[in-house]
Amino acid sequence: MFGSNDPLDFINHIRDNQDQFWELFREHMELVVYATIIGLIIAIPLAIVTSRIQAIEKPMTWIANTGQAIPSLAVLALALPLFGIGFQPSLFALSLLAILPIFLNTLVGIKSVDAAVVDAARGMGSSDMQLLFQVQLPLAMPFLFAGIQTAVVQSIGLATLAAYIGGGGFGDWILQGLAVRNFPILLAGAVPVAVLAMIAEVSLGIMRRIVVPKGLTV
Amino acid sequence: MRYILDNPERVFELTVEHLQLVFSAILIAAIIGIPLGILISRVKWLALPVLNISGILYTVPSLAFFAILIPYTGIGKTTAITALAVYSLLAIVRNTAAGMNEVPAAAVDAARGMGMGQFQRLRLVELPLAIPYIFAGLRLATVAGIGIAAIAAVIGGGGLGRLIFDGIRSIDANRIVAGALMSIVLALLAEYGFSKLALLLRPDMRVKAERG
């Protein structure tokens, strides 16, 4: 069964189909990058507003936590009856799910800024905006970065599933490999995705250590 | 919704299958993960490599993980449970170790002063104090497991994912919605049910789980 006995045959499949490989790579990364950017654009202002308004902090946190418990496949699958098949419904689902970790981490970051530091900034005559951009956000950086890391790694996985609703990416080869029961095609999709996710996790971790000052590491 | 009302037996059957997948995986992961968590809280130099390796493994997307396992474990439940158990392991090891490290040194000293040996201390003092954390790990593993098990349907794992993928294949919104809704309900029940259970066991302690 499954075409080949040598698990490493997938390398040949990639070599023989290099154009398609890079096309799938591009589709995959487009989903991940766009979803993360949309997630950032929505989540950061949302976290700032939430950190300022006591009354909505609890419900917003509850919603985000509950959202994280929801199976991601369910979100992706529900995008299909709502928006049809293709790139856009996939991007919609991925963005929605990218908002959650970025929002929660940014909120925790802003909230964890020492009250004494906030007081000191106020005492020096900082306006609301100065307090936010010169004190709270810089100090929340390590958390924000952790949120982005989670969102990117999670999106790489979700983009794989997006192939099922026509989103493209490496999931296409996994899907095809399963359908025609062919190991090399299956692994030609699966191994790059696994490597991609691990590289993203490790490199964003390293980047976080470089960008974030030593005294601020969490 | 209509699909659930029209086919209650089928939905029930798939729900049971889904939970079987998740619970067998959690059981395996707990049997390996709790002792491993205790071990790395004792043998400090092991902690970093174990947590780092499991942390990196955890980032591998579940669909890719299933696919990579297929050459070794074939199509079906074995592959599904293996992958699920590996994912659950991370949450359980991490939280067990965190719980053990949170045990107040004074409590351990007191136990030692009362003449308790290694194993008595573990059984009577440290583990009971670490229970809320271990529970948090189990909860996290269960909630994530319910989500990942839905994906296992593509590699013949069965469960509610079958409704979702069959629905996608035949563009049948009713089935997609039925599968998605049921998996959401299960995940939320696990998320909030577990917290309630932990509070019943240890009403004095609330902890946040350490996500992966």
Image: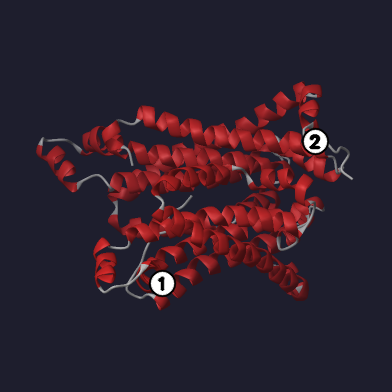
> In the image, what residue type sits under mark 2?
Ile
Residue at position x 70%, y 64% from top? B178
Q: Is residue B158 visible?
A: yes
Left or right of residue A170, residue A205 in this image: left
Pinpoint residue A107: horizontal percent, then vertical percent.
35, 47
Q: Which mark is residue A185?
A: 2
Which colour scheme appears in the figure?
Answer: secondary structure
> In the image, what residue type sits under mark 1?
Arg
Pinpoint residue A13: horizontal percent, then vertical percent.
80, 28
Looking at the image, which is closer to me, A193 or A160? A193
Q: Are marks 2 and 1 in contact (CB under 8 Å)?
A: no
Q: Which mark is residue A40?
A: none
Query: Around disc 1, counting alpha carbons within 10 Å, would you say few (fewer than 14), some (14 to 19), or many (20 or more)?
Result: few
Tell me where residue B45 sits by quadrant: top left
Q: Is residue B76 above or below residue A131?
A: below
Tell me where residue A159 sits by quadrant: top right
Mark 1, residue position: B123
Q: Is residue B184 visible?
A: no
